[in-house]
Structure formats: structure tokens, C-alpha cells
Image (tube, rainbow, N blue to C red):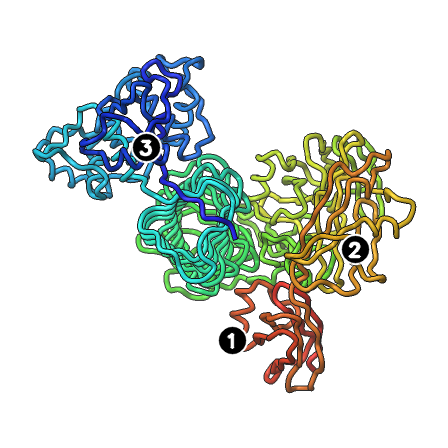
Amino acid sequence: MFRTMKRHAIVLLIVCLMTSGWQLAYAMDNTTDRTGHWAETQLSAWLQKGFIQGYEDGSLRPNQSVKRGELVALINRTQGLTESADIRFADLGKEHWSYVDVAKAVKAGYIEGYEDNSIRVETNVSRQELAVMLARLLKLGASESAKAVTKFKDGASIADWSRSAIGALAAKGIIDGYEDGSFRPAVMVTRAEAVVMLDRAMSAAIYHKAGVFGPQNGTETIKGNVVVTAPGVTLRNMSIAGDLQLAEGIGEGDVTLQNVTVAGKTQINGGGANSVHIEGSVLAQVIVDKKNGLVRIAAGGTTSIKEVLVLSGVIIETGDVTGTGIDTVTVSESLPKETKITLAGSFGNVQLLASGLLVEVPKGTIAKLSVGSNAKDTKLVFGKESSILMLVLNAVTSVFGQGDIKHAVINAIGIVFEKAPGKIENGSGTGSSAGAGGTSSTATDNGEDSTADPGNGGGNPPIDPGNGGNPPTDPGNGGNPPTDPGNGGNPPTDPGNGGNPPTDPGNGGNPGQVTVPLASLPLGGTVTESVYVGGQRIATVGDSVYATLDQAGTIYLVPGATSRYLTLLDYVVEQGKGIRKQVNAGEKAILSTAGLVPGDYIVVGVNGSYALSAYSGDQELRLNAPASTPLAQNSLYVYSNSKMIDIGFNKPIQNGFATMEALKATVSYATYGGTVTSGTYAINDTLEIRDNVLRITFANAPVGPAKIELPVNALKDSNGAPLAAKTAVEFDFGPSLTVRKETNGSNVTVVTDRAAEVYLYHRGASLTKADLERAVTVGSARKIQTAANTEAAMSTVGLPAGNYLIVAWGGSSASVIIP
């Protein structure tokens, strides 16, 4: 168990920073001028913690004023701010000690320059200026109540530009007036006042190192706020009475909330494409506001979120939610044009207020989706696995994809549908025209069913979801790679067009058949010839390869585990982890792999109607590292059913010893919590080298987590260079399942080697847990909870005949036939 690491956030580390105004401070607890001071309690506590320090003469100088540059530097450090804006202030050069911190503060949005383009870092900070900085930092606004300034007898003299900030902070008890009831907004802030105001504003538990925090059992109650400033943090079993901030310092890393309740706001300012995992938690309001890039929120279990306010690009997934999920999603009108949003799963009310958005719903159900009157030129892309119960369009919108729209209300002219809704009606005051499937038709206001054929998703046969739809086809891999961990285990068929793409939706002609783009990575014809080995296309980083698309559109080359979301494809490219290129139909697009990291990649095509290419094997590419790059491990595939693991490397490998038995003797193995020692394999466990993969197959697989270690000399590359460093991988096959007996029309008896949730469902159904739970609820699937090594019967009564899959959730699976 990790030790809990807490401290107060926004700690005013008054450590004399390279300024002429502050002397070099020494850590002294015997300061002479704090005794009897009105802020003695806070000052003493902060001295003891090392947050502030005294001067050489033993003084603390609590009544000394604080400069603007000093406050900015301190706030940045405690918040872990890293991103900078491009700043050009007339009175601040790059050589000044505070230049970098001011750039960070401007980027974070809590400080601005003056009208004369100055920033005045050497100027003392007034009480009202600090109030504005704090209000912006805490994301408070006029709505928090500017009326609270009336409590101060000089409230009428408070400037309009600071009035709402002071009112919001006063309403929360962060700032107080003087004994005479005045606020004195223009008075300069002293060190003592800054300590007290910042302590009140950000008195919080702060988690600044990776680890698991919170009790294993029971619930920890935190009365104040909580701030997470580092990636790799898991908060569990907590009740937070204040706000939760996932700060910018998280960067592109992950944060997990497990059974966490937040009474206040949850502010998401950091995180990346894999990033914020919310499991079994209850959150009131979530505000997504990442200054640069994309953040991904994955909600699961019994999670309940009342509202999500979107202020930046985001992917929100609720595929594994078994609770109430997310009630309302509001996409703010402040978002810039061409912002991409992905919503996958179940949502209540979705409101789009910004113009020029691209909103993708690849799968799931939305009860009501509304496009606001100012949200013109919005593009909606509904995947074939999506269902929109009510769609209200108050501005010009293009609706792509084969999703099932039950009922559409049209309140604007120029609406275009790729697939007609089940019902179309005019809203009040419109005589709008809606085009569906390339045909222009007048919407009716009586809500009658439209006659357009809703399509069947392209007529494609169902894909067995037991393996996530990704190769290799081990149906019981327990969610481990190569199954894409970001798509809920669903097959990577085209989520955006359902296999039926459009004629030009605006051509007003007869409906045509929508065609799925076909993307491929052909053999030969590359600038640097790639080698085709064992059914896989292989190149070396720096080579150029070519790909083709049968329609005009965009070709992407991205890591193989990338979820097939439009939003994510572009984000991966923008992060420098993939390539994209606009192409004409049938054109050979030359793709340079220079700058990419070694690993498995896939080609994805997107046509002009935002339809994604369906998966096929000829889209895969493996990039090996150049010969000069040290040999290193870069992937791990776990196969639950086969009880084997593939340890992948950045280039082809060879045995570092004369025989495989000699290699096997150097490989160490241990179960979780045990000591890693050599020679613990059974005699019939096997090791194989397959190009760039070391495959280990267990005759008697470990139960629970386990570890494998390889010494530096165990393997070498084709030039004879040995493994660069000792390599350790951890893995877990998950629950192992065995079908003991089948009774026709009655039940199936199973045994698992540990307690597990076991599902029985028809092949072709979705493998996401939420979908399976819904299938159990409606009676089309079965679920039982097993105990370790104990027979358990699953009833098959009432299930139609056919091929079924039994899955121990997170582990292995088996096929059964119900006659």
C-alpha cells in the first residue's frame, strides 16, 4: 500500500526567488515578528511546514507587501503549471527571472496585462488584484454572486472589473474585510494577508506523486478541496466535501477515481488520450477545460455524474456504466470552430451551443441531443451502433452516418441527413427543408414516420466480439492487448458510417448507396521496399511506405491500439504519434515513417462524409527500430485462453545463448508477492522466438498477477547487440473458466479458478460490460457470480438456439451451443 502524501495546495513558498526585492531566506523557526500577529496561527503553521521562511535577521516581515511577479511564480509552482503562452509585454524581457512564470500564468488564464501592454511584475499587488487572480484560478465568476460585496461598507467603491471576483470570494468565505467593515480594495496585500487568503482559497489535500491514495476499506472524508498535480494517481474510497481539481501538471498522464464522491466541482485541466477513469463515483458537476490538446474521460461501474460542462476538446465514454451515468452534457459556446467532441455510451441530455463543431457519436444512446440556435455549421456523425431518441436542430446542421434517429425536430433551413430519421417534424415558425440520403424532402409537422430505408448497417455479418474484433483472435484475452483497451472491447468495424456511406448529401438527386472507404497498405511500390513476413507488413522507422484509399478523403497511419474515433485519429497525429494525408480516390499516398516510434501501426481511411474504413488485415504495419537503436521491449500481449504471453521488442530478436533450454534457464518467473527466482518453470513450459516476439506458453498458468524477468544477455538483435537492460513484465491471465457439462435446454455448469462474474450471451452481441448487463436485464443473456473452484450452473431456459459464448469477465472464455 502506498503511503498517503498530502499537503496544502497553493502553498505560498516564500523562498526569495532571484529578485532584488527579497533577500535570500534561511529556514528559521525562531522568527521574532510573528508573535502576537493577527495571522500568527497560519504563519506558524506554514513556517513549521517549510512553506514560508524567515530572513537572516530572524524576521518574517509579515506586513511587507508582495510583488506581482513573486505571487505568480509561487502559484505556478504549487499548481504544477507547465504550459506557456507566447507573451510580448512592453516591460518584461525574456531575460527577467519572472518571464517564464508570467508566460505560464497567462496560459493558465489567471493573469492578464494592462491596457498599455505592461505586466508590472515589480509592482505590489492590491487586494482587489489578488482577488481577481484567485477567482480566475478557482474558475469563479459573476454567477457566484457579485452581490456579496454589499457586506463591505466601502462596497460601492469597489471597481467594476474586480467586483464579481471579490463577491464570489466573499461568498465562499475566502476573503474578509477589516474590523471596521471595509474591504479596502486598493490597499496592497501583505505577506500575512497573502498567506491567509491563499490558505483559505486553496486549503486542500494535494497529491503530487503517483500512487494509490485512500483506504482499502471504508471511506476517508476530506472536508476541504483536493488537488491532483501528477500523473499516475488513483484516489479511492473518498468523500470530498469541497472541489476536486485534476490540474495541468498531470500532463498527458492518467488519473483514476474509484468510489469517490465530490460534493463540489470536479475541474479537469490535465490528462491525455487515455486519461481520466471514473469508476463507481458520484460527481455533481464536471468541468472539462484543458488548455491544449484532448482529454479522455472513461466512466464505468455505478458512476453517476449530474452535469459535464465542456470547455475544450474531449472524448467521453460511458460504455461500462451500470449506474445512472451522465445526465447532462453541455458543450460551451466559447469553443472555437472545428473543435472535435466524441460521445460514446449512454447520455441523458446533450446541448451543443458552439458553432462549427464536429460531434461524433460512434455508439450508445442519447435521450435528447439539441443543437443551439447559434451552433450553425455543426457536423454530427452517428455510428451504426448509436441511437438518438430525440434530435432537435435549431441551426444549420449536417448529419452523417447510419445511426438510428428516432425523432427529429427541425427548426432551421438547410438541414441535411445521410440517413432519414424515423420521424421528422417542423418546429414552430419554420417551413424547413431536410435532405435525407441525398434526397431533398419537405419535413412535415405531424410527426409521421418517414419512408426512408433506415439501412441495416451495410449488411455486414456480425463480428464475434469475444476478441475485441482485433487480431490476434484470442476471444479470452481478458481485455489485454492486442484488444484495443479504449473501445470497450467492441470490434473495430467502422463506427462512423455503419457500412453504408452516402451519396453527396446535398446533391438533391436520387438516393445513392453509401460506400465504406477501403484503406490498404499494399505490398511493394514503397520508396524503401518493405518486407512481407509471416502475414505482416514490416518496415523500419525512417522508411517510406504507401497506402491507398478507394475514395477521396484522408489516410491515417496510427498506432494499432488507437480507438477508431475521428477525434482521436487527429489528436494522435497532432501529438506526433501518427501520420495523415489527404488523397484522391485510388491515389498512392507516400507516408514517411521518420519520427515515429517502433511498434504496431494500422492504416485507417476516412472519406468526405466522415465514414471510417472497416478493419482488414492488409492495413497493419510493424515498424522496427533502426539498427543503431538499442534492443528494448515495447509491447506485451496476454492470451487468457491459450495461457501464453507475447513479449514484443522494437526489432527482430535472436537467442543470446546456444540453445532455447539455456535461454529458458536465465528467465526468472514469480507470482505476485513472491521472490523472482530462476528455474521455476515446469518442464513442459515453452519459449519461442517469433521474429520480434518472445512467446512464453505455460503448461500450468499462474493464478493471479505474475512477473517475468529477462537478463540483459538473454536476447540480441540481428547485429549481435544484446538486450539493453534487464526487462521485467507483469501480467495476469484473469479468471480461468471451464465448462463442465451442458444440459440441453436447461443449464450449463462452469467452474472458475477464482471468484468471477460469468456471462453467457449470444455470439455477435457487444462485449462491453454495460451492454451485457442490459442484455441480462432484458433476458437475452445470463450472469452468475462464481466462487473459486466451485461448480456453478447457468440457466439456459428461454434462450433461443444458437452459438453462445461464456466469459469469465477479465479472463478466459468458452463456446457453447444451445440446441
Q: Amino acid at mark 2?
A: Ile
Asked if the residues shown at circle 3 and circle 1 are in contact, with their CB atoms under 8 angstroms apart, the answer is no
Using the rendered image of the protein, determine whether residue 655 is visible from the camera's viewpoint: yes
Q: Amino acid at mark 1?
A: Val
Specify the label residue 778 is tagged with: 1
Check the image and report above or below for 95 versus 286: above
Question: Which secondary structure lies at badge 1?
Answer: helix
Number of numbered discs on residues: 3
* Mark sitting earlier along the chain (3/2): 3
**Dot 3: within a 10 Å radius of its alpha carbon, few (fewer than 14), some, or many (20 or more) residues?**
many
Residue 623: give x, y in percent of width and height.
75, 39
607 relative to 137 in the view: left or right: right
Question: Viewer-nearest of labels 2 and 1?
Answer: 2
Residue linked to disc 3:
47
Q: Amino acid at mark 3?
A: Leu
171 relative to 497 in the view: left or right: left
Foreground residue, 124 or 333? 124
Asked if the residues shown at circle 2 and circle 1 are in contact, with their CB atoms under 8 angstroms apart, the answer is no
Residue linked to disc 2:
696
* Mark sitting earlier along the chain (2/1): 2
**Dot 1: within a 10 Å radius of its alpha carbon, few (fewer than 14), some, or many (20 or more) residues?**
few
Residue 648: give x, y in percent of width and height.
75, 46
Tell me the residue at 60%/36% (across/down).
573
Tell me the residue at 25%/32% (across/down).
131
Give the spatial CA distance, label 2 vs label 1.
41 Å
Quadrant showing the C terminus: bottom right
Question: Viewer-nearest of labels 3 and 1?
Answer: 3
